[in-house]
Image: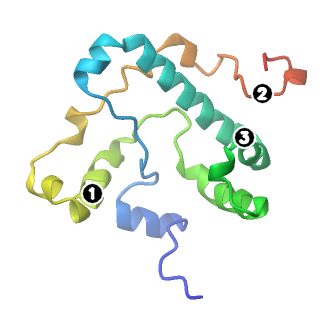
Amino acid sequence: MTVLFDPLDPARFRKIFGTDNYPSYTLCARTQWLEKNPELARKVARAVVRGLRHLHDRPVSETVAKLPPEYQSAEPSVDIAVIERWRHKYSRDGRFPESGYDAVMRVTAHSVEKVRLANIDARTIDTNEFLENPVLKETAPNEFTNPAEGAKP
């Protein structure tokens, strides 16, 4: 096998994407739904942030063990190796890095014609409003921590 591009090399990643962390996952919802369901949106955001914290703070083997079976490969060691290599690319707090907006638009424009032809500023369609909640502060208990360490299971 020949590796054509290793996106985990920080210098190459930055050169190609223009950012250290490419925000490849996002939660999308219509404005009308968010206006009617702000508490549910906060709960979803909180769950995502707790998952991100777990990914960063706990052994990768714990993350793999929590994956639903349909997302696990036949060999857990492969899952562990892949997640270990990629987890530093995920945000800890769920926020887009400032450099991520332009990177996402450039990459998406290559494969989605409507995006390529539109004049979209991703900063105008993104919000961290549902992440800005006191329960998301670093001091909040992490439901994924080991009960023996004093947090709720």
- The CA span between labels 1 and 2 is 36 Å
Q: How many marks?
A: 3
Q: Amino acid at mark 2?
A: Thr
Residue behind mark 3: 66
Label placed on residue 64: none
- The CA span between labels 3 and 2 is 13 Å
Q: Secondary structure at mark 1?
A: helix
Residue 76 x %, y %: 77, 58
Q: Quadrant of residue 128?
A: top left
Q: Quadrant of residue 136?
A: top right
- In the rendered image of this protein, does residue 34 appear above or below residue 10? above
Residue behind mark 1: 108
Residue behind mark 2: 145
Q: Amino acid at mark 1?
A: Thr
Residue 132 in view, yes or no: no
Q: Secondary structure at mark 3?
A: helix
Q: Nearer the viewer, mark 3 or mark 2?
A: 3
Q: Is residue 22 left or right of residue 66?
A: left
Return the residue nearer the eye: 1 or 106.
1
Q: Is residue 94 left or right of residue 105?
A: right
Q: Residues within 10 Å of mark 2 (few under 14, many from 20)?
A: some
Q: Secondary structure at mark 2?
A: loop
Which residue, as the protein is rendered here, is positioned at the far right? 148
Identify the residue shown where x is 24% and y is 23%. 31
